[in-house]
Amino acid sequence: MYTQSPTEQQEGWSPAPERGDAFSLAGLKHGDVLFRSPEAAFRGWADPADDLVECRDIDYVRAVSSLAENLKSRQRNTDVIFGAVPFSRRLPGRFFAPRQRRVPLSTQVEGRVAAQPGRECRRDALPDRQGYVRAVQSTLEAIGHGEVDKVVLARALDILLDEPVSYPALLGRLLSGHRQGYTFAMPVPAESGGLEMLVGASPELLARRKGDRITVNPLAGSAARQTDPVKDSAVSQALAASEKDRHEHAIVVDDIRQRLAPLCRELKVPQAPSVIGTDTLWHLSTEITGVLADPATTALDVALALHPTPAICGQPATAAGRCIDLLEPFERGFYAGLVGWQDVRGDGEWAIALRCAQIHDSRLRLYAGAGIVEGSDPEREYEETATKLGTLLHAVF
């Protein structure tokens, strides 16, 4: 059995667990950090002495580079920087290096559901069903007039509980139900000041870097899973053959190919998407791989070169952004932004913040969106957002 040294105990480190060990969520609280992917898992503890930067737009990469240099020069017992970038670069992102964190884990991460959820006191939809359907109809009119090719329209649910959220319980449910995705809890700046928690289980990797190798995995085009295996298989096959969904997916892949080309000396883009599944949805997926032309290009450099992709904004981006500003009755904040980690060498993973909520105390705002293209049906797009919201709703309740 491994016993920590006094130094390791003081600095909050723990060893990589042996096969079969679980990743403990005990004591995880507001301000702490968790990021788990198929590649690695981290847990950090809030500390006022953390290296921390909040910045906007062009300063994102500069901030992370500065934090990395600080870590190397001070010989801190950590080389990983965590961060979150909002959907709109008008808002500040947040990057920090917790003094106390667990090393990345290669074994399976599990959470224990220890607490019962609080009772729901109030729920407000932004917009309601009719409002969202009208917004989709307005978007389809803009598409028909040639103003835009695709717009991703989101909606939100504001939920008030009768007691503060239990992060160990919430994260435990997300971890147990979403083993192949990107589960996260990250403190981010609140619109009203202070910090709130960005918590979610995203299926979508935006960018991963290992040395000079990168992976980008856009998802676009979705269909709800079915409990009956025969019907579920039929839905998967129908999605793979759907002209509307393949068109939506192609818009995303073509845009990413064009943006990655200047960064890579080799780029491999499959000719057709595959179909992958989460617990609630089938998605069209394309795994794009490349070799960087400049090995100094970091994971965050790649992610910011792609953000926002048509998968979470639309195409063309400027026109789609105007539609989003006009039709969504809320600020997205960190929804559809970036969340992830990067080490001092520039390796790391940045996922798109989907299937997520921003949480403070007993108040939660949940988000979900759908890609609107020619041929979209407003009622079906609303149902798609309802299915996506189910990921967090099932974890909360």
Image: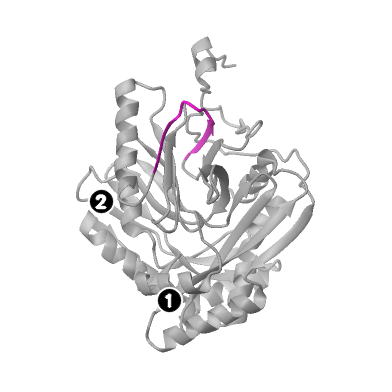
- Please state which of residues 113 and 137 is positioned toward the viewer in this rendering: 137
Q: Mark 2 points at which residue?
A: 291
Q: Which amino acid does label 1 sit on?
A: Lys
Examine the rendered structure and indicate whether residue 25 appears above or below residue 292: above
Q: Residue furthest top?
A: 6
Q: Residue furthest front?
A: 192
Earlier-in-chain disc, 2 versus 1: 1
Q: Which residue is drawn at 66% across and 31% down?
A: 26
Using the rendered image of the protein, determine whether residue 250 is visible from the camera's viewpoint. Answer: no
Examine the rendered structure and indicate whether residue 235 appears above or below residue 291: below
Residue 21 left/right relative to 298: right
Instruction: Name the main secondary structure of what is drawn in magenta.
Output: strand
Asked if residue 47 lies in the magenta stretch, the reply is yes
Q: Which amino acid does label 2 sit on?
A: Val
Identify the element where label 2 is drawn: strand
Q: Residue furthest bottom?
A: 145
Residue 291 left/right relative to 162: left
- What range of the chain is rendered magenta? 40-54
Q: Name the residue under label 1.
A: 150
Q: Position of residue 40 (x, y in %)?
A: 48, 39
